[in-house]
């Protein structure tokens, strides 16, 4: 049985960012949708789960989710603002100033 480090091709003292980078490369190469072997892909997933779960930096995933949420929220605000401006111009009404928090 090979170790998780050997599957992903990282050294035993690798940081979480190195493990993530190695897993992404591995996943692109072995993903079944791209002609890869499903068994090797699942082995890579398991190896990543073991290595990422054992790392104290695994909490970074929560911060990534929060950042993505706020980016989407900001994008939604920008889209709402664009729709408001367009509809007001189409109806020949003055465009309201943007709301400031």
Image (spheres, rainbow, N blue to C red):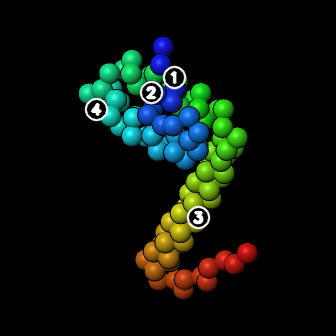
**Cα separation between marks 3 and 4:** 33 Å
In the image, 44: left or right of 29?
right
The answer, for residue 79, to whether it is visible in the render is yes
Q: Earlier in the sequence, mark 1 or mark 3?
A: 1
* Mark 3 or 4: the one toward you: 4
C-alpha span from label 1 to label 2:
6 Å
Tag 2, which secondary structure? helix
Circle 3 packing at 10 Å, graded few (<14), some (14-19), many (20+), is few
Residue 30 in the figure: left or right of residue 92: left
Which mark is first along the chain, 1 or 4? 1
Q: Quadrant of residue 40?
A: top left
Residue linked to disc 4: 34
Check if mark 1's residue and mark 2's residue have beta carbons within 8 Å: yes
Give the alpha-carbon distance from disc 1 to disc 3, as whole Å. 42 Å
Rendered residue at 60%/35% (across/down): 52
Q: Residues within 10 Å of mark 4 (few under 14, many from 20)?
A: few
Left or right of residue 31, residue 78 in this image: right
């Amino acid at each position: 049985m090979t170790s998780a480090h050997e599957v992903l091709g990282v050294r035993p003292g690798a940081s979480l960012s190195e493990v993530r980078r190695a897993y992404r490369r591995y996943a692109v190469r072995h993903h079944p949708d791209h002609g890869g072997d499903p068994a090797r892909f699942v082995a890579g997933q398991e190896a990543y789960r073991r290595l990422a779960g054992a790392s104290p930096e695994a909490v970074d995933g929560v911060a990534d989710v929060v950042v993505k949420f706020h980016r989407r929220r900001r994008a939604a605000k920008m889209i709402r603002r664009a729709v408001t401006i367009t509809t007001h111009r189409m109806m020949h009404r003055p465009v309201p100033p943007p709301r400031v928090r």
